[in-house]
Image (tube, rainbow, N blue to C red):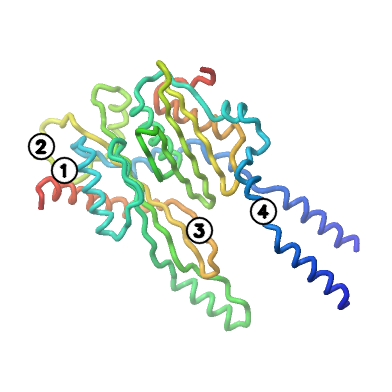
Amino acid sequence: MTKYAGIILVCLCFLGGCAASARQAIMDTNSESQVQLRQIQTRYFDSTDKKKTMENVMATLQDLGFIIDKASFDIGSVTATKLKGYNLRMTVNVMPRGQRMVVRANAQYNIQIVTDPIPYQQFFDALSKSMFLQAHIDE
Amino acid sequence: MKRVLLVCVSALLLSACQPSIPKDALLLSPESLAERQLQTRRFDTTNNQAMLSAASAVMQDLGFNLDEAESTLGVLVGSKRADATSGGQIVASILIALLGGTPPPVDEEQLIRVSMVMRALDPTQTADKQFKETIPTAKPSQSANDGATEPQNQSTVRVTFQRIIINTAGRISRLEQINEPELYKEFFDKLSQSVFLEAHEI
């Protein structure tokens, strides 16, 4: 019995030294390819009004139960959080490109990156309704 | 032995399945319109800076600290920490302890966050006109307008409150949006008053 206890103690000592890898957590893309993820998270709108687009992004997020944490017109970014027994955080970027507005959204659910295309589709559907404009998948 | 193995295997399988995002997390709910009406008021001004400074004064009156302010987009975010102990929970916990059980952790502290977004209404846009119909006006009106004609320069202000409750074990026990109608009514009353005071430099 004491022998076993000794072995367990030694094992525990070793285990204590192993923290989760920081590099892995930072560079994690959830096995999705970068291109694929960008496609899921990006839509194009036929608008040249950056302010209006950002206002609609914020109104949509608020309608979906988010509160706006941070916003910057110059950078074109909005970050929002939804608390409903879970913590859902989203950052939405609005970038003018020619005659179009590029909108990219990314979401984090608790400690997981959201890579499922369906929630993003739902978000862009709601945004498209608020903007009275169609969301294009391709440039 | 077999049973232990079974438990071990199921534990292993369970650890692999983290709960993923709920199906309706980013879906517009039927209640969203009612929530929007609850959280939004119309004001007879399009001056972002005046509204933001009036709102920041109200937040400071209520003991909030400002976390973020963006005047171009009309965004203001504040937060405060408050006590979250509830009498009922403590009584229940004492009763359990008296009965010889281990008392469960009780709520101890809450982090309350408030976020405000102001948006100018464009009277020439049909979308804004439709949107305007659904939003009540803030009272008392701070403008000199006697109500005979609808003022052209209007904007909507939407405020949302959220809170995170932490218990005595240091764990999060609640994550929620606060949707009490009374709270929003009181906040907007204070805001209209503050807008009036700022406008008249009192």
**Does B1 appear above or below A50?**
below
Disc number at residue A20? 4
Question: Which residue is identified by label 2?
Answer: B145
In this rendering, the label closer to the viewer, 4 or 2: 4
* Badge 2 element: loop
User: Of the numbered discs in the image, which one, if any, rests on residue B174?
Assistant: 3
The subunit carrying tag 3 is B
Q: Secondary structure at mark 4?
A: loop
Which label sits in the foreground, 4 or 1? Answer: 4
Image depth: mark 4 or mark 3 in front: 4
The reply to whether callout 1 and callout 2 are in contact (CB within 8 Å) is yes
**Which image quadrant for residue B154?**
top left
Residue displayed at 58% across by 43% down: B22
Measured as percent of width and height from the top left, residue B43 is found at: 21, 39
Quadrant occupied by the N terminus of chain B: bottom right
Cα distance, mark 1 to mark 3? 37 Å
Tell me which residue sits at (31%, 35%) in the image: B134
Residue B134 versus residue A7: which sits nearer the camera?
A7
Return the residue at label 1. Answer: B141
Q: Amino acid at mark 1?
A: Ser
Residue A66 x/y as whole percent: 44, 43
Q: Residues within 10 Å of mark 2 (few under 14, many from 20)?
A: few
Image height check: is B78 above or below A120? below
Compare marks 3 and 2 and give the one earlier in the sequence.
2
Q: Give the letter of the chain under mark 4.
A: A
Mark 4 Cα shell of 10 Å, populated few (<14), some (14-19), many (≥20) = few
Q: Amino acid at mark 3?
A: Arg
Q: Nearer the viewer, residue B41 or A55?
A: A55
Q: Position of residue B144 (x, y in %)?
A: 9, 39
Distance from disc 4 to disc 1, alpha carbons, whole Å, reads 57 Å
